[in-house]
Amino acid sequence: MEAIASAKYLRGSARKARLVVDLIRGKDVNRALAILRYANKRAADGIEKCMRSAIANASEAAEKANVAIDPDDLWVKTAFVDRGPTKNRRRVRPAPQGRAYREQRHFCHVTILLSNDAKPEPKAAKGNGKVAQAKPAKLAESKGRKRGGAAAAPRAKRAQKKGEAAIAAEAAEEKKTKRASKKKTE
């Protein structure tokens, strides 16, 4: 069973509210409420109210459908923030050199969808022992080849410089050995 709740015209920009919503997406309800309670963001209060409304909506829908639902089994299936209107207030802020800037107030709309269905399994990492699918032949070929063109140019220059440095080091080594042999003969 799924339940949805939305809070419209919350104060603050959508970008700032998304920072909070990203913290709770995919978490179970109790953990999400704890995160919202202790989040040090202004948008967290409005999002917490929206979450509590979604929990109430879920229990109400379950009651109407004559189904028993435990609020602790709910988890945040989807949560997103949309941009609301920018209120054009007839007020101005002082700006440099005698100018004035118009004041803008941002609003946002938050929507939260809760579900008590089983959570999807997180996708397995590459190195956990499961059999990986075969790579396409073209991809496997390209792994063995060296890169050419502009991507290889900086590496070629570095290799060339290293080669020149090695040659210079060998020449210096030869000079030292010649000097040492001259001193021994004298």
Image (spheres, grey):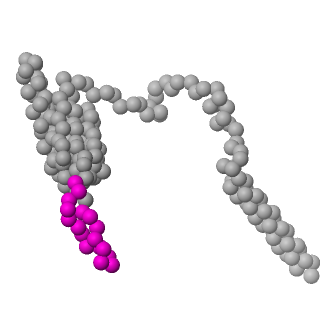
In this rendering, position of residue 94 left or right of residue 172: left
| Percent coordinates x, y for residue 183 in the rendering | 88, 79
In front: 8, or 149? 8
| Percent coordinates x, y for residue 111 in the rendering | 22, 38
Residue 18 in view, yes or no: yes
- Residue at image position (27%, 43%) is 81
- Residue at image position (70%, 38%) is 145
Which quadrant, please, contains the N terminus?
Answer: top left
| Percent coordinates x, y for residue 42 in the rendering | 19, 55
Res 66 quadrant in image:
top left
| Percent coordinates x, y for residue 40 in the rendering | 20, 56
Give the farthest residue toward the front. Answer: 90
In this rendering, position of residue 99 left or right of residue 113: right
Residue 174 on the magenta span: no
| Vertical order, 35 against 96 (above or below) | above
Q: Which residues are magenta?
A: 87-103
Give the farthest residue toward the right. Answer: 185
Q: Examine the residues drawn in magenta and state their main secondary structure.
A: strand
In front: 130, or 97? 97
Give the farthest residue toward the bottom. Answer: 186
In this rendering, position of residue 64 left or right of residue 128: left
Which quadrant, please, contains the C terminus?
Answer: bottom right
In front: 9, or 130? 9
